[in-house]
Image (tube, rainbow, N blue to C red):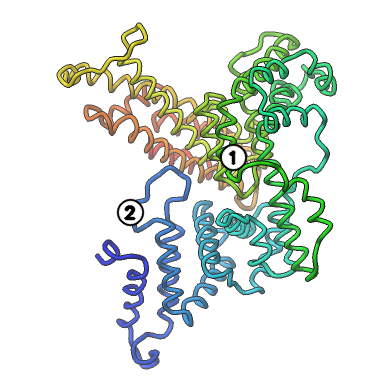
Amino acid sequence: AGADRNNAKEVADQIWAISHLFLGADSIDDSTSVGIEFGIIETLISLIVQCTPQGSGMPSSSPLNELVYLSRVLLELTKLKPSLVPQAIVLAVSGMFEDFMPSLTTTARENLGHWLSFHLTNTDYQWPKSYWEHWAPYAAVDQRNSRGDFVSIALWSMATLSPEGPEIVARECLPAGSTLVQSVFLKHTQNKADLCSTENDLINRIWDTSEDPDSIRQHIISDELSESYGSTVKSIDDGADNSMSQPKVWWRTRLATRALFHPLSRENSRMIALAEKAWKKKTSAGDCNDMEDEYHAEEGKDETEDILADLTDAIARFKPVLLAALARDADAYDSEATGKVDDDKLLLAGEVSILSEIGGLVSAWDSTAVFSLIECLMKNQIVSSLSVATWALGDNKEEMTNVSPQWWKVVSLALNNAVTDALSRADLSETDLGGGIGMIIDDAAASDGADSTEADIKRLDESLKTAVPVLKYSLERVCHLVSTTNSAKKIPIAAADLTEGMKRLSRAVLFQLSSLALSPSPSLTLSNLHRGLMSMDADGEKLASACQAVECDGEQERKLLQHVAFSVEKYF
């Protein structure tokens, strides 16, 4: 009751009052039970790892079960009992790191990393040096592991909580000479090779001279550009598998994308350079004037601080440039390829090339920028939800190294935008008179039961037509990747990410369809949704059967596929 009415500080006071219920002979000052802080901390951390993950598009089971709220309560407990709670937190995190981290799900590990970053950011980064030194080797190895992922998530999250980015982590949080700066931040340094004159010219036209978009569009599709820049791109190899997905096919599209999103690349380079400078300065206790001079020219760029706002405006303004480049590359491929080309697959490959370029420009720790830019691209109808899912799940490559643990959040975001747009178009078609003039239906007409139910069913049908193809593709892709794991001993962390992500995505899709298509329609229920899924062969039984039909050799792979099948059957 108190948690419902009071703020985090008052809730922390009430939680600590529990200690008065367990008094014994060894109690502290006759009012507090010895060791009670460990029980309190472990309980709160257990709640934190079970929270709904951030960025999932799903509501928490309760406002009191949100990650930020629980993190604030734990922070207030630290302030309330500074001699007891901090050491209990350190020991609890150490115990989880050593004994339980490999058994935690992807979401639980992510929640723990986000909480630790929030806690350290608000306690002046006070954490034992020996722990960072002990954790460093796990993040330094090339092969992914649960402990290394936890450390990287915590440090990346810290970088996003400060406008200084990774610089403040290197300067204030990590000990001098820590290899974590290299393994977590500096390994993501982009190629410092000089940009070609063509790309520099395009960047100048977009960002420095603000040239008219139509003029740039004519330039990007011109034969002159093909002769000067396209000649450096090798001809298409028709004998290669998935040749339409090769980067050289979409050279105009990728060139235009890199130029349009150049501020991302420049900001990433600036952040990395400042982090490296802070790290070297802290290590040598001296100045790094050479680095400062090297980056001085880049810092002098005339650009507002809000890069995302600038890019949002630029995407809308230069949308014709991207689409023209995409169409020109598609036509060039179609004219050179042998045999009939599937136009839908060709367009999908082009959209994926745009997302791939952006993914290579955004900082590894800045998931907020990725989500924002994808949402903006979809609202401007530059990429589709299926292309986002294809890119997020590794662009149909056989290996799982290109699949981010965040893939399901990206797909969930894309589906939410796509379903919302489909419902908006369905509503618009209902109020359109055919001559392009919209009308407002009065209450008497809108109250007609049959017409209302028919309109609701149409809205549901449109949302299912949008969501089901992406859901089926995601399930098929996840099952395929899991089946090729070939692990005889233990489940690879990437395979665990895929199965956990499919479970989370299934829940998110069901929530989105229910909240967007059913909730505004009192005449429809979940049974209508399930009948609609069944009509499209996307009900739980059929999805689970498709998953179980995937062939695999290993026992671990079969267990994972069974887990995926159980998840989709449960939700659909």
Q: Position of residue 201 (x, y in %)?
A: 77, 28
- The residue indicated by pointer 2 is 62
Q: Position of residue 111 (x, y in %)?
A: 50, 56
Q: Residue, x 34% and y 73% (percent of image)? A: 15
Measure the alpha-carbon separation of dots 1 and 2: 33 Å
Answer above or below: position of 334 versus 316. Answer: above
Residue 422 falls in image quadrant: top left
Label 1 packing within 10 angstroms: few (<14), some (14-19), many (20+): many
Q: Residue, x 79% and y 19% (percent of image)? A: 237
- The residue indicated by pointer 1 is 482
Label 2 packing within 10 angstroms: few (<14), some (14-19), many (20+): few
Answer above or below: position of 315 versus 496. Answer: above
Of pointers 1 and 2, the one earlier in the residue sequence: 2
The amino acid beneath tag 2 is Ser
Q: Secondary structure at mark 2?
A: loop
- Tell which residue pokes out farthest to the top in this image: 435
Residue 33 falls in image quadrant: bottom left
Q: Is residue 291 left or right of residue 411?
A: right
Q: Residue, x 62% and y 74% (percent of image)? A: 128
Task: Please say whether residue 79 is visible from this viewpoint.
Answer: yes
Decide which of 390, 71 is in the foreground and name it. 71
Q: Position of residue 60 (x, y in %)?
A: 37, 50
Look at the image and tell me in which quarter the N terminus lies: bottom left
The amino acid beneath tag 1 is Val
Q: Position of residue 214 (x, y in %)?
A: 64, 17
Q: Residue, x 36% and y 19% (percent of image)? A: 426
Q: Secondary structure at mark 1?
A: helix
Q: Is residue 176 left or right of residue 352?
A: right
Number of numbered discs overlaid on the protein picture: 2
